[in-house]
Image: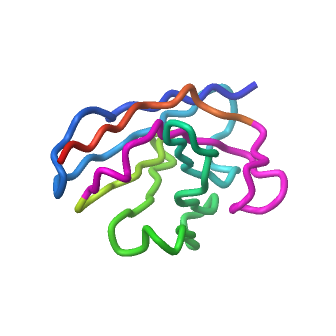
Amino acid sequence: QVQLVESGGGLVQAGGSLRLSCVASGRAFSRDGMGWFRQAPGKEREFVAAITWSGDRLYYADSLKGRFTISRDNAKNTVYLQMNSLKPEDTAVYYCATDPLNGYFSLRYRYWGQGTQVTVST
């Protein structure tokens, strides 16, 4: 069993930055790819970014390239999402997930965190 706990969300003004963290526990963190997803009110959950177990390959939603950066620290069992130049449309609950079952872009990950709220004000 794997537990994922996200943190770092909050309220920020448009143009600001936040860094989300996701700490994994329960088994060897470094073996699995990790992903970030988000779900805005009334919308479906969508892919944000993903990173391979070694960190040598990064994947981003096309619309977020250049503003969001994913990284990981296997020594700390943690994956990060640095979000810059935030916009009101980035408002959502952000989830981390691990153990992708059907590729990094799919929603089919075996383990999910509870999410952290990000709210971007105008």
Question: At 21% from the left edge and 52% from the top edge, which residue is drawn?
Answer: 17
Question: Does the magenta segment cover residue 96?
Answer: yes
Q: Quadrant of the N terminus?
A: top right
Indicate whether 26 appears above or below 57. Answer: above
Question: At 66% from the left edge and 26% from the top edge, which residue is drawn?
Answer: 26
Left or right: 44, with 63 as reference point: right
Question: At 17% from the left edge and 58% from the top edge, which residue is drawn?
Answer: 15
Question: Does the magenta segment cover residue 119?
Answer: no
Q: Residue furthest right?
A: 102
Indicate whether 37 appears above or below 104. Answer: above
Color style of the picture: rainbow
Given residues 20 and 116, the one toward you in this image is: 116
Left or right: 11, with 30 as reference point: left
Question: At 51% from the left edge and 27% from the top edge, which residue is drawn?
Answer: 5
When asked about the image quadrant of residue 45, the answer is top right
When asked about the image quadrant of residue 84, the answer is bottom left
Q: Position of residue 67 (x, y in %)?
A: 33, 67
Q: Residue furthest front?
A: 42
Q: Position of residue 96 (x, y in %)?
A: 56, 41
Q: Position of residue 46 (x, y in %)?
A: 60, 52
The count of marks equals: 0
Q: In the rendered structure, which segment of residues is drawn in magenta?
A: 86-110
